[in-house]
Image: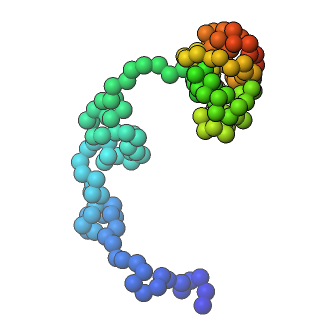
Amino acid sequence: MDLSNLKPAQGATKKRKRIGRGEGSGKGGTSTRGHKGAKSRSGYSRQIGFEGGQMPLQRRVPKFGFKPLKRVEYKTVNIEKLQEIADTQQVSKIDLDVLIKTGIVSSKQLVKILGKGSLTAKLEVEAHAFSKSAEEAIKSAGGTVVKLQ
């Protein structure tokens, strides 16, 4: 046995009519491509998203708004929630570890403290950002603010 007499296994291949091999083959002339037009010519490849001349989906869908590339997304926590944590867990320092343990934020989120509610406990609060009202409320209650980076 050598390379000259190798052939596929019985039933592995089907006989198909070879196109573009002269008029006598029955599939000559236009070679099943029809007459004229881009698809009949060599080198044709359909553009991605082309829908046969119909207005493509990406042009039909309305587009509006603006999404800045460098936007920083924060998970927000109000000071009323900090007061609730201080009451239930008896802690004087609220940092990311405490917020993660309570299930308020996940470990990959940035945290911003907002000023909704009232704060009576003297707390040391660590977060990535603070609103002005939250910062004032924490300091007026005798606590300290630590900004993480």
Q: Residue at x 28, y 53 (%)?
A: 33
- In this view, the residue in front, 74 or 105, is 105
Q: Residue at x 67, y 28 (%)?
A: 86
Q: Residue at x 63, y 25 (%)?
A: 82
The part of the image, by quadrant, that contains residue 142 is top right
Tell me if I can see residue 59 in this picture. Answer: yes
Residue 108: horizontal and vertical position, in percent?
66, 36
- In this view, the residue in front, 65 or 17, is 65
Q: In the picture shown, does residue 140 fall above or below 86?
A: above
Q: In the picture shown, does residue 54 fall above or below 134?
A: below
Q: Residue at x 61, y 86 (%)?
A: 2
Q: In the picture shown, does residue 12 fall above or below 116?
A: below
Residue 106: horizontal and vertical position, in percent?
63, 37
- In this view, the residue in front, 110 or 84, is 84
146 vs 119, left or right, is right
34 vs 18, left or right, is left
The part of the image, by quadrant, that contains residue 5 is bottom right
Q: Return the residue found at the far bottom.
A: 1
Residue 35: horizontal and vertical position, in percent?
23, 48
Give the position of the N terminus as an image quadrant: bottom right
Tell me if I can see residue 147 in this picture. Answer: no
- In this view, the residue in front, 87 or 54, is 87
Residue 75: horizontal and vertical position, in percent?
58, 27
Number of marks present in the image shown:
0
The part of the image, by quadrant, that contains residue 57 is top left
Colour approach in the figure: rainbow
Give the position of the C terminus as an image quadrant: top right
Q: In the picture shown, does residue 67 fall above or below 21?
A: above
